[in-house]
Image (spheres, helix red, strand yellow):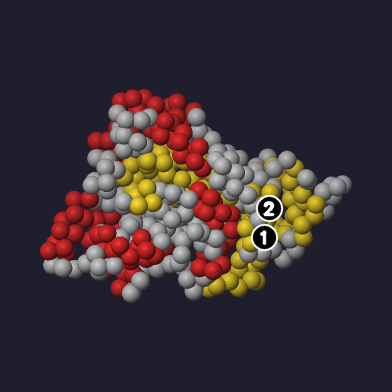
Amino acid sequence: MDLVIKGGTIITSHSRYKADVYIKDEVIEAIGTDISVPGAEYVDATGKFVLPGAIDAHTHLEFPFNGTTSADDYLAGTRAAACGGVTTVFDFVVQRKGLGIRESVAPRDALCAPKACVDYSFHVALTDLTPEVLDEFADAAAAGLPSYKLFMVYKKDGLMMNDAAIYKALLRSKETGTLVAVHAENPDLIDANIDRFKAEGKLSAWYHYLSRPEDVEAEADIRAIHLAKMTGAPLYIVHLANARGMQAVRDAVNEGYQIYAETCPQYLNFTCDVYKREDGRNFVCSPPIKNQESQDALWRGIKDGYIQTVATDHCPFNQDQKDWGKDDFTKIPNGCMGIENLYPYMLSEANKGRISFEKVIELCAENPAQIFGCTTKGAIEPGKDADIVLYDPTMDFEVTVGNMHSDCDYTIWEGTKLNGYITDTYSRGRLVFKDGQFVGEPGWGHFIKCAPRS
Ligand code: DUC
Ligand code: ZN
Ligand code: ZN
């Protein structure tokens, strides 16, 4: 069915204007004034903003981790995404040791496809960088999988990749137009701190932060940037959360290196003081949420253009899972929720005047589409998929677990007041969220083949 969204204000990263959007066969067919299409369905968007659906470039859905599995499976996670205006979700597939990149993705894609409520793609977390896997970069990229993450931590979980592996991956990424991402923290410093705190009986959630404070992350950021400089390859730093790492990104970009930084809403909204709260364990994620100085540096980085994307690292665990670490922070599964909060939170910050709406579109839609090669996503333009969000800037909203659409039984965003909220989400022209209700269907979402860099 043809659809015309009439009378709204379209926002891009560099402009805003009133226009109608004509959608045909899941794609934006035309943008113009007074569009009239016989037989089409008309949607009145007067007073609303017409925005591209957000791309959450960093999630962990039904993720086996820390001896358990994250609480949102592909259905719940993509349902929550739809309700938060996210129309493309990148999930991390962990390479099974001994298996190749595409072999590791295939079973996860099979799991995701019947459940996905919005479109999705994958980054692959490499854990076994054999010569065969390095040789597979080009073919995996041609199959739509051109981005690889290397964990610099989680040694005991078998996920960590050493500097030599990062160096080799960067070199090969440069040859193949692929992109290497890193989770940057120093595992040896973390272990040394944990051993000391355990010996001293310091086991509350606050010591999760103190075992991985600002410089534990900064050291790894600086090391990864150094490796990228040595190879001349681009580098994407996931979930940047500290001021000194932010400065290292600024310096490297100013020297002409292609360093992309991503941060997450939890680092922009909370400080490490949350770990002193009675429910501090619910905020345990890695890297941990840092201090006010770091938060301020991240916002400055956004304003000055040194942070390219905001994504969530969505990896919720239910209260009973978090409670494993009630008396010992080392037993708390690492991860927080955010997939439904990313776009509304960033748009609310724009509505409050901290940044522009155009900047939010750049961070949450256009940049992730461009960096990860989602050529059909990220903008309201003819030819792009009709992934569209209608946003009412006058609507007040308070986040509470009851009005979220995840399977998790609490939210760290409880009580957060937002200025403005999403009223409708369209995924390829199909309505999937309307006035607080999920109206989509599992299996609607498709795998999106990402293009390698030219
Ligand atoms: N950090 C988290 O907090 N959760 C999932 C993986 C990660 O790196
Ligand atoms: Zn990570
Ligand atoms: Zn992550």
Q: Quadrant of the N terminus?
A: top right
| Residue lying at 54% horizontally and 57% vertically, measured from the top left | 80
Residue neighbourhood size for the residue with mark 2, other residues' Cα within 10 Å, grouped as few (<14), some (14–19), many (≥20): some
The tag on residue 431 is 2
Looking at the image, residue 198 sits to the left or right of residue 144; the answer is left
Looking at the image, residue 194 sits to the left or right of residue 366; the answer is left
Percent across and percent down for residue 169 are 33, 34
Assign a secondary structure to mark 2.
strand
- Amino acid at dot 1: Lys
- Amino acid at dot 2: Leu
Looking at the image, residue 29 sits to the left or right of residue 195; the answer is right
| Residue lying at 37% horizontally and 63% vertically, measured from the top left | 320
In the image, farthest residue toward the right: 38
- Image height check: is 210 above or below 136? below
Label 1 beta carbon within 8 A of ligand 3: no
Q: Are marks 2 and 1 in contact (CB under 8 Å)?
A: yes
The tag on residue 434 is 1
Percent across and percent down for residue 358 are 58, 57
Looking at the image, residue 372 sits to the left or right of residue 25; the answer is left
In the image, farthest residue toward the left: 199
Image quadrant assignment for residue 129:
top left
Residue neighbourhood size for the residue with mark 1, other residues' Cα within 10 Å, grouped as few (<14), some (14–19), many (≥20): some
Percent across and percent down for residue 156 are 23, 47
Q: Can the viewer see residue 434?
A: yes
Q: Nearer the viewer, residue 65 or 380?
A: 65
Q: Nearer the viewer, residue 28 or 59?
A: 59
Image quadrant assignment for residue 390:
bottom right
| Residue lying at 51% horizontally and 59% vertically, measured from the top left | 406
Image quadrant assignment for residue 419:
bottom right
Label 2 beta carbon within 8 A of ligand 3: no
